[in-house]
Image: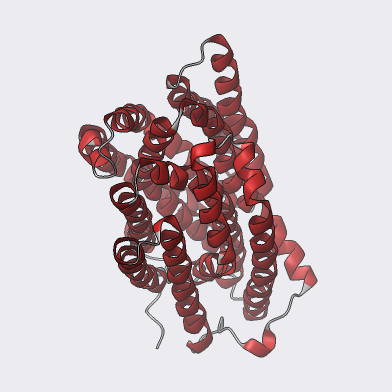
């Protein structure tokens, strides 16, 4: 029997969104934990250069993972809309088209990633002393990209129908496997950075198998059946309209960080390791935004399909309120204990100093990104994925890169890497709030949809 789904169309709004977001949040926390454990094990048992190699390659890996995370959001919004409208045929078509296309796209990106790993590292100015290990890590990581893609898209489909519990459980299991294999391969078999990459691929394989088995064995309208795996091109086209902008949007954010990190990489291994550590800490705040955002886009999508428009705006407001409370808790703890958290990864005082400074820059100003990002997730739920992508690309990504380029020409200092994130978040919230108010909220007011 399938786990009881959360009803997003009726009942207490805050409770429904939190219940949907909580397993996503916990799953992302576990995902970040095992990614952090990768770095801790490498930093403690292999060394600072290897830790820098993981840091240099991690953002490239995140670039591709981000694409599938965004794609799953778009696919989920479309499936949620059909589910809210009770269109069982289109629900089936969307599921099988999504899984089939994910396999094909995942294979293509896997092959491309293996071939061009070295070129990608050259693009971000990866230093010579960490290049070989970073390239090895990437090639192994890309070999399992299909598993990563299937887990993300499959989880997005399950969440679209109110099941965020099972994807969370599968991620917990795979995270545990990853940590155990990390220790075995690195501490006992002395496989170094290759062992860490292999452990990650194997754990992703396990999570993908669990998601697909769940989808194939439930007695529901969205059951996955092997004989139905094919691409319906009308559905594929609609799915890409929703999914590709979301996928590109997530990837472009990571791409902007890669471009910024190309400056970081010129400051040496300690700076690379320090920024990598700060990014690991920052991701624990990011999961608050992404989990609430994914839940919110599903919530908006279902209520749009059911034509419950007034309920949508109440849910958006309450989601932002929940996010700000979490920022005070998670962000506050990360700010206060930045040095202690950074010290878990390495003994290098220089790397720790960089990590602490960057973490505190980010945590103090994160509330601006949280507000703007949640509004952007809601816009995706309204079906405006292309608008959502353009806003994030032009405003946040563009301002981040522009600030870094200009300031580095004025004075070549590492602190400008930290500042560019804060500047981009200021620009992002200054654009997103008025856009949402005038283009979305006021439009529904004028149409007398809400009071």
Furthest toward the top, the residue is: 410
Looking at the image, is 336 positioned above or below residue 247? above
Q: Is residue 360 left or right of residue 411?
A: left
Residue at image coords 49%, 38%: 129
Q: Position of residue 53 (x, y in %)?
A: 46, 45
Residue at image coords 63%, 87%: 226
Looking at the image, is 409 positioned above or below residue 210? above
Looking at the image, is 447 positioned above or below residue 218? above
Q: Which of the two residues, 18 or 62, is positioned nearer the viewer here?
A: 62
Q: Position of residue 135 (x, y in %)?
A: 56, 50
Q: Position of residue 246 (x, y in %)?
A: 61, 51
Q: Position of residue 10 (x, y in %)?
A: 41, 66
Q: Which of the two residues, 101 or 269, is positioned nearer the viewer here?
A: 269
The quadrant of the picture occupied by the N terminus is: bottom left
Quadrant hosting residue 49: top left
Q: Which of the two residues, 1 or 302, is positioned nearer the viewer here?
A: 1
């Amino acid at each position: 029997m399938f786990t009881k789904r959360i009803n997003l169309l009726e009942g207490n709004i805050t409770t429904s969104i939190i219940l949907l977001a909580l397993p996503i949040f916990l799953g992302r926390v576990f995902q970040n934990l095992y990614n952090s454990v990768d770095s801790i094990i490498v930093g403690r048992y292999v060394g600072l250069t290897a830790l820098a190699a993981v840091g240099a390659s991690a953002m490239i890996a995140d670039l591709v993972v981000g694409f599938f995370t965004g794609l799953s959001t778009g696919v989920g919004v479309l499936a949620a809309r059909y589910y809210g409208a009770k269109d069982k045929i289109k629900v089936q078509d969307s599921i099988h088209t999504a899984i089939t296309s994910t396999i094909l796209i995942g294979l293509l990106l896997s092959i491309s990633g293996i071939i061009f790993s070295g070129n990608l590292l050259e693009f971000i100015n990866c230093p010579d002393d960490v290049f070989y290990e970073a390239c090895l890590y990437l090639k192994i990581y890309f070999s399992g990209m299909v598993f990563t893609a299937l887990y993300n898209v499959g989880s997005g489909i399950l969440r679209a129908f109110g099941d965020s519990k099972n994807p969370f459980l599968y991620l917990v299991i795979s995270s545990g496997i990853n940590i155990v294999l990390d220790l075995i391969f690195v501490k006992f078999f002395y496989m170094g950075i290759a062992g860490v990459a292999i452990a990650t691929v194997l754990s992703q394989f396990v999570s993908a198998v669990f998601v697909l088995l769940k989808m194939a064995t439930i007695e529901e309208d969205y059951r996955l059946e092997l004989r139905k795996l094919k691409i319906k091109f009308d559905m594929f086209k609609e799915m890409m309209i929703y999914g590709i902008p979301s996928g590109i949007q997530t990837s472009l954010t990571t791409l902007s960080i890669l471009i910024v990190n190309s400056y970081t990489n010129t400051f040496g291994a300690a700076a690379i390791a320090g920024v990598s550590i700060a990014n690991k800490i920052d991701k624990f705040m990011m999961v608050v935004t992404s989990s609430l955002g994914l839940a919110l886009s599903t919530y908006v999508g279902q209520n749009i399909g059911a034509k419950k428009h007034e309920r949508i705006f109440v849910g958006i407001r309450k989601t932002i309120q929940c996010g700000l409370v979490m920022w005070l808790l998670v962000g506050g703890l990360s700010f206060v204990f930045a040095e202690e958290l950074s010290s878990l990864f390495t003994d290098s005082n220089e790397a720790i100093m960089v990590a602490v400074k960057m973490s505190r820059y980010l945590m103090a100003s994160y509330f601006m990104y949280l507000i703007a990002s949640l509004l952007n997730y809601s816009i995706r739920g309204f079906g405006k994925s292309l608008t959502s992508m353009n806003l994030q690309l032009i405003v946040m990504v563009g301002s981040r890169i522009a600030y870094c380029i200009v300031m580095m020409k004025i004075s070549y200092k590492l602190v400008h890497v930290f500042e560019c994130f804060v500047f981009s978040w200021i620009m992002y919230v200054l654009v997103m709030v008025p856009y949402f108010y005038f283009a979305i909220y006021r439009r529904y007011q004028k149409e007398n949809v809400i009071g």
